């Protein structure tokens, strides 16, 4: 029986990958499963929060009936959906693996394989979390970082650049961490603290993350 430590709080979570259309049948995407975000949503709702879960294409399904799931496809859709609710949010957690670039133009018809080479011009997608950081009023904002080099430095730089209150660093170097796995190994940074955790199930990682958030906002 979980204590209702987040009763009265609204938590918005982004999860999963985004798909960026190339033509009516193809897209640019990534291997994010959405598991971390869905685990966070379950745990936050167990703790009594109102949970708004905005997810890109993922095969995960919410278990707790009270989770408000909004499915989106592209980064632009995700951004728009986030800002439908942002004013009501107390805690924002961006665990989505948003595609950094999208095709400049979406072909109206399926692209034919005529030539030997095909070039698709890509343009930068909006940075959803950075926009949340810019528009922050009272929201406690949590971001994720997945780095392959200079992990801690890059995570701290992201913390500043996106005006965050907390950043969760996933290590790709650790076996079983990140992306498609059911387990994750994280470090959490706030402005003043650094905490390292062992390799755990994403359910238990979600508990650690929410414990850290609660320690910050309820103090
Ligand atoms: O800058 P980078 O993509 O490494 O930052 C990762 C963090 O920013 C994650 O929390 C991710 O959900 C968020 N993000 C976002 N919109 C983007 C890119 C990243 O919300 N376009």
Image: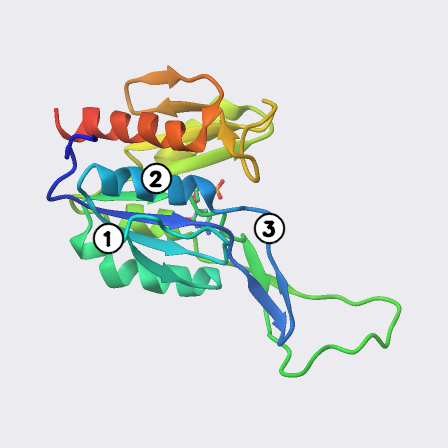
* Farthest bottom residue in view: 109
Is there CB contact under 8 Å for labels 1 and 2?
no
Q: Secondary structure at mark 1?
A: loop
Q: How many marks?
A: 3
| Measured Cα–Cα span from mark 1 to mark 2 | 14 Å
Q: Is residue 168 left or right of residue 121?
A: left
Which of discs 1 and 2 lies nearer the camera? The answer is 1
Query: Does residue 21 lie above or below 144 as drawn?
Result: below
Q: Is residue 79 left or right of residue 1?
A: right
Which of discs 3 and 1 lies nearer the camera? The answer is 1
Query: Does residue 80 lie above or below 10 as drawn?
Result: below
Label of residue 189 in the image: none
Q: Residues within 10 Å of mark 3 (few under 14, many from 20)?
A: some
- Residue 124 percent location from the top left of the image: 53, 57
Q: Secondary structure at mark 3?
A: loop
Is there CB contact under 8 Å for labels 3 and 2?
no
Question: Which residue was labeled with disc 3?
Answer: 30
| Measured Cα–Cα span from mark 3 to mark 2 | 20 Å
Asked whether residue 122 is in view, the answer is yes
Q: Secondary structure at mark 2?
A: helix
Question: Which residue was labeled with disc 1?
Answer: 66
Residue 80 versus residue 68: which sits nearer the camera? 68
- Residue 164 percent location from the top left of the image: 31, 37
Query: Does residue 6 lie above or below 106 as drawn?
Result: above
The quarter of the rendering in which ligand 1 is drawn is top left
Q: Residues within 10 Å of mark 2 (few under 14, many from 20)?
A: many
**Does any atom of ligand 1 lie closer than 8 Å to the CB of label 1?**
no
Label of residue 40 in the image: 2
Pointer 1 or 2: first along the chain: 2
Query: Does residue 216 lie above or below 32 as drawn?
Result: above
Which of discs 3 and 2 lies nearer the camera? The answer is 2
- Residue 39 percent location from the top left of the image: 38, 39
């Amino acid at each position: 029986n979980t204590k209702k430590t987040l009763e009265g709080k609204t938590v918005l979570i982004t999860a999963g990958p985004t798909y960026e259309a190339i033509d009516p049948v193809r897209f640019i995407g990534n291997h994010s499963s959405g598991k971390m975000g869905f685990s966070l949503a379950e745990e936050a709702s167990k703790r009594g929060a109102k949970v708004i879960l905005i997810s890109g294409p993922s095969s995960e399904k919410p278990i707790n009936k009270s989770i408000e799931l909004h499915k989106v496809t592209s980064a632009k859709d995700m951004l728009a959906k986030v800002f439908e609710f942002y004013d009501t949010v107390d805690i924002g957690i961006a665990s989505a693996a948003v595609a950094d670039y999208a095709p400049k133009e979406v072909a109206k018809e399926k692209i034919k394989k005529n030539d030997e080479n095909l070039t698709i011009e890509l343009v930068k997608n909006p940075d959803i979390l950075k926009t949340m950081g810019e528009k922050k009023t009272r929201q406690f904002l949590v971001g994720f970082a997945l780095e392959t080099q200079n992990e801690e430095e890059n995570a701290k730089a992201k913390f500043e650049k996106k005006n965050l209150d907390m950043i969760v660093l996933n290590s790709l170097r650790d076996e079983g961490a990140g992306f498609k796995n059911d387990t994750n190994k994280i470090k959490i940074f706030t402005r003043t603290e650094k905490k390292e955790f062992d390799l755990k199930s994403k359910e238990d990682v979600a508990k650690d993350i929410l414990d850290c958030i609660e320690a910050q906002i309820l103090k």
